[in-house]
């Protein structure tokens, strides 16, 4: 079945450090891929998405590229801020379905 | 996009009691979903709620434990029945704009439930 695997956290970085959170997936066909962010005490918010191979999603300085050949959708940011401290979820959605498959989430803590 | 509100935002309940969580959307939507997020875990889909029909439950979830109502296109409730400490979780409502997989789902802020 479909699945999403994320790197385990927590990830602790200093402000302005480079961030990578790995995400790989298993799915039949061509799913859409998403990164959601959950700030402390809040619900999930869409951070970015990509709907086909080689698409790059970007938002708020975060980027992720849909790599079909490596079945990956790694999240990157060149310079993190304290305000980026949150839990990040990778997710996929297969065509013709409503169902999302979420990864286990990666907690990011950015220190000033 | 859709703006979703949930009530209550949090609650502490005694085992054996039931809690009903409300989800309100600012626009009419066909599909509404209920998720559970146990402490330190990912999101697990409980059920899909369509207006005018019975909810569709995922494996491991049953209607007797998690009855759902969907009286109209902007509102749904999830009841957590006969609660035990294992039901302590965040419960999230979400909506979907349609069967286009390029669309994202929008999530409510969640209801943080603690069962003593």
Image (cartoon, coloured by chain):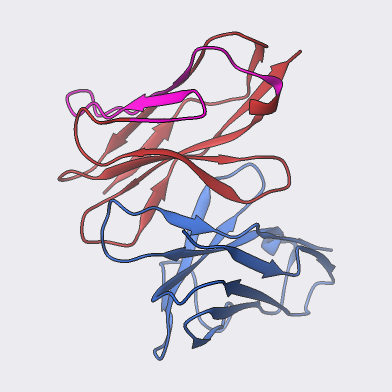
Chain colours: A red, B blue
Residue A96's spot in the image, x, y percent?
21, 61
A95 to the left or right of B30: left
Direction from residue B57 to residue B115 in the image, left or right: right
On screen, A110 above or below B16?
Answer: above
Q: Position of residue A46 (x, y in %)?
A: 48, 44
Is residue A39 part of the magenta span, yes or no? no
Please tell me whether residue A44 is drawn above or below residue A47 in the rendered image: below
- Towards the viewer: B86 or A20: A20
Where's the C terminus of chain B, which quadrant?
A: bottom right
The magenta stretch spans residue A71? yes
Horizontal side of residue B84 vs A38, given as left or right: right
Above/below status of B108 relative to B23: above
What residue is drawn where x is 57% and y is 59%?
B36
Q: Is residue B90 found left or right of A22 in the rendered image?
A: right
Can you say whether A46 is above or below B56 in the image?
above
Percent position of residue B93, x then y: 56, 65
Q: In this orientation, which residue lies closer to the viewer: A56 or B8? A: A56
Residue A68, how many percent across, how many down?
A: 19, 29
What is the quadrant of residue A73 in the picture?
top left
Q: Magenta segment, which residues? A: A57-82
Among the 4 quarters of the image, the one containing residue B105: bottom left
Marker count (numbered)? 0
Q: Residue at x 18, y 43 (%)?
A: A30
Residue B85: image quadrant is bottom right
């Amino acid at each position: 079945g479909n699945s999403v695997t994320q790197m385990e956290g927590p990830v602790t970085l200093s402000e302005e450090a480079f961030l990578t959170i790995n995400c790989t997936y298993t799915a039949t066909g061509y799913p859409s891929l998403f990164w959601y962010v959950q700030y402390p005490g809040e619900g999930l918010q869409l951070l970015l998405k990509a709907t086909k191979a080689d698409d790059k999603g970007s938002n708020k300085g975060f980027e992720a590229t849909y790599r079909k050949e490596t079945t990956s959708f790694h999240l990157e940011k060149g310079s993190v801020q304290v305000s980026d401290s949150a839990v990040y979820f990778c997710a996929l959605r297969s065509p013709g379905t409503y169902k999302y498959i979420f990864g286990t989430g990666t907690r990011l803590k950015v220190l000033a | 996009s859709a703006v979703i509100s949930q009530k209550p935002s949090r609650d502490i309940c005694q085992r054996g009691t039931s809690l009903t969580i409300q989800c309100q959307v600012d626009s009419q939507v066909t599909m509404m979903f209920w998720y559970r997020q146990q402490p330190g875990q990912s999101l697990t889909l409980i059920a899909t709620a369509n207006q005018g029909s019975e909810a569709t439950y995922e494996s491991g979830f049953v209607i007797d434990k998690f009855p759902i109502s969907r009286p109209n296109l902007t509102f749904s409730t999830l009841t957590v029945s006969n609660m035990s400490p294992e039901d302590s979780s965040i419960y999230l409502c979400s909506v979907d704009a349609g069967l286009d997989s390029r669309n994202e789902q929008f999530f409510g802020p969640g209801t943080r439930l603690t069962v003593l």
